[in-house]
Image (spheres, rainbow, N blue to C red):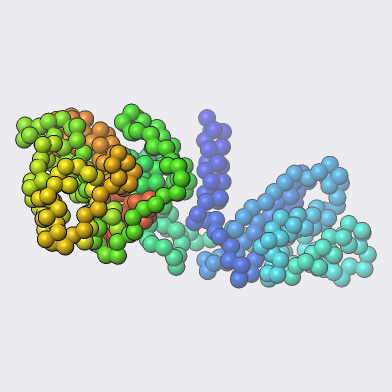
Amino acid sequence: LLLQFLQAAFEALKTLLMSPPVLRIANPEWPFEVITDASDIAIRAVLMQDFGNGLQPITYESRKMQSAEHNYPVHDKEMLAIVHAFKIWRCYLTGADVTVRTDDKSLQYLRAQPNLNPRQIRWLDYLESNFTYSSRTKRAPTILPMPSPDRLPNSQHGTDRIWVPSYRLLRELLIQEVHDSNLSGHFGVDETLKALQRFYYLPDMVTDVQRYVAACPICQRMKSSHQRPTGLLQPFEPPQRPWQHVTMDFVTGLPALSSGNDAVLAVVHRLTKMEHFAPCRTTIIAEETARLFISTVVHLYGIPAAIISDRDTKFTSKFWQDTWARYGTRLQFSSTYHPQTDGQTERTNQTMEQLIRTNCPDRNKWEDVLPMLEFSYNNAPSATTNHSPFYLNYGMDPIVPISTNVESQ
């Protein structure tokens, strides 16, 4: 049992040494230090730089000695480790200022030796012709100050995010929060990953999110498959300002409720992909549709310059066309029997139906959860813009439970 504990501690120590914040990315403008060592069976080396808190490792290297190398004298074994390290890290060390630290003090005076064997001459010629370096004996070991374990060292790029260590349970809880909760909506890998990346950094987070979403039973049971379209996409010209162009359609076939509602009017802003859902009846007429559109969109954003829809009789009626002609709004219709013309709305409708299936176990309560589903949709980062519709409309992300810890930092 003690041996198992020691082995687990050793493996954990190796993981820490090979992970941020201990392991750093090299700065090619700064000098390097190559620390080498050799034993009777293997050679090893560490490439390091001083980032202001003492030397920190960039990368590690080790290998077993070949059968002939076991017969080398001690100073040749030490020099073998140096030459091997310079060959492996040539991309870092060529043209850089390099200090070599080794156990064998005699290697500092190798250039002054009158008699060198052919192997030493060959090695010395390789080092002298390709690199600029100096040799010193190893310094006494020191304890390096460690940064805070929950944050990466100071960075001049990006945004502040909490660094999450490799604790499986903690990582699964975070992914579950941004994928499964009522404010998340069981979106796919890209949306879940971007939502998580707003506030947290997890090593290998892409793999973890892919594995989690692929294993989600609700997603596998409820979502439909989407094949890539053939040919070149010919979208409408994008609008130049928020809520200038909108698309709209009805999602029908929902369970009828006591209120009489059995459909949803979905309105999408084409620039930011923001969407509003309004419950209604399948039998709604043009006048009621106009009032519903005004109470859902116009009172918040004003009159749109263009409305894109299919050729439903409500949208082709004289009342509908006269109403929007009075306001100066241009009506654009998709091709008959070809819903791909307005693919954005059709895809959004599928997403909304998917949200209802995955987040509303009781189908007779879909109207009660509709506001939260709208929130989930608008808070999910878009694959087109890499930002959520909320952020593109208001310049900030909404506060959700997973963000409260970050906001308080």
Q: Is residue 51 left or right of residue 380?
A: right
Task: Choose top left, top right, bottom left or bottom right for residue 94.
Answer: bottom right
Q: Is residue 400 above or below residue 303?
A: above
Q: In the image, residue 3 lies at what x, y percent?
A: 56, 33
Q: Position of residue 170 (x, y in %)?
A: 37, 42
Name of the residue lying farthest toward the front: 318
378 and 45: which is toward the camera: 378
How many marks do you count on the picture?
A: 0
**Horizontal side, residue 286 vs residue 59: left or right:** left
Can residue 303 be seen here? The reply is no
Asked if residue 301 lies left or right of residue 390, the reply is left
Q: Work out whether residue 343 or residue 161 is closer to the camera in this orientation and state it.
A: 343
Q: Nearer the viewer, residue 113 or 309?
A: 309
Q: State the quadrant of the C terminus.
A: bottom left
Residue lying at 10% horizontally and 40% vertically, measured from the top left? 284
Residue 348 quadrant: top left
User: Does 131 appear above or below 337?
Assistant: below
The residue at 41%/49% (across/down) is 233
Quick one: 319 or 301, which is closer to the camera? Answer: 319
| Percent position of residue 381, x then y | 33, 51
Residue 91 in the image: x percent, y percent? 68, 61
The residue at 14%/57% (across/down) is 324
Q: Is residue 263 left or right of residue 272?
A: left
Q: Does residue 160 show up? A: yes
- Residue at image location 69% in from the left, 49% down from the top: 62
